[in-house]
Amino acid sequence: MSDPKDTKRIAVVGAGIAGAACAASLQQAGVQVTLFDKSRGVGGRMSTRRAAWAGEGGNECTVEFDHGAQAITARQPRFRVLLARAEAAGMSAAEFAAENDPYTFFRKLGDLIVTGPTNTNVMDVRIVAVREEVE
């Protein structure tokens, strides 16, 4: 059994698609990853916003909207591999995107990262200093 002090620990700042992909790759390589984001949820420019209000008669009205990128171009080989894995598993990335459901897509693919509660932005700030001993 390895010594826990030997485990590499990395902080990834930004839980958009690039940060989440980076964290997933590091985690698959056996690195202990902590993912941080300034927002309440993950997704960055690919996230969905939700709003609710009381309408006439007190009934609840809701709306969902995507506020960022409306399309994805698979130029990078690693992203193409992810999409091919999804297709091989019988999953259509386009269908999950149309339903605004990246959570289920990545969970079924085995690449979901759950960051935990964030409380407030100020409480989430971590500053990591790594000093490497040089002889």
Image: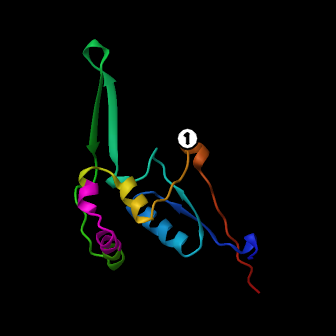
Residue closer to the observer: 2 or 78: 2
Q: Residue furthest bottom?
A: 135
In this picture, residue 62 sits left or right of residue 18? left
In this picture, residue 45 sits left or right of residue 10? left
Residue range corresponding to the magenta coloring: 82-97
Residue drawn at (30%, 19%), measured in percent from left and top?
Answer: 59
Q: Position of residue 62 (x, y in %)?
A: 29, 31
Q: Position of residue 127 (x, y in %)?
A: 63, 57
- Callout 1 amino acid: Thr
| Relative height, residue 91 to residue 46 (above, below) | below
Residue drawn at (61%, 44%), measured in percent from left and top?
Answer: 123
Residue 90 falls inside the magenta stretch? yes
Q: Position of residue 130 (x, y in %)?
A: 67, 69
Q: Quadrant of the C terminus?
A: bottom right
- The residue that mark 1 highlights is 120
Q: Quadrant of residue 27?
A: bottom right
Residue closer to the observer: 12 or 92: 92
Q: Residues within 10 Å of mark 1 (few under 14, many from 20)?
A: few
Residue drawn at (57%, 40%), measured in percent from left and top?
Answer: 119
Tell me the chief SS of the magenta region: helix
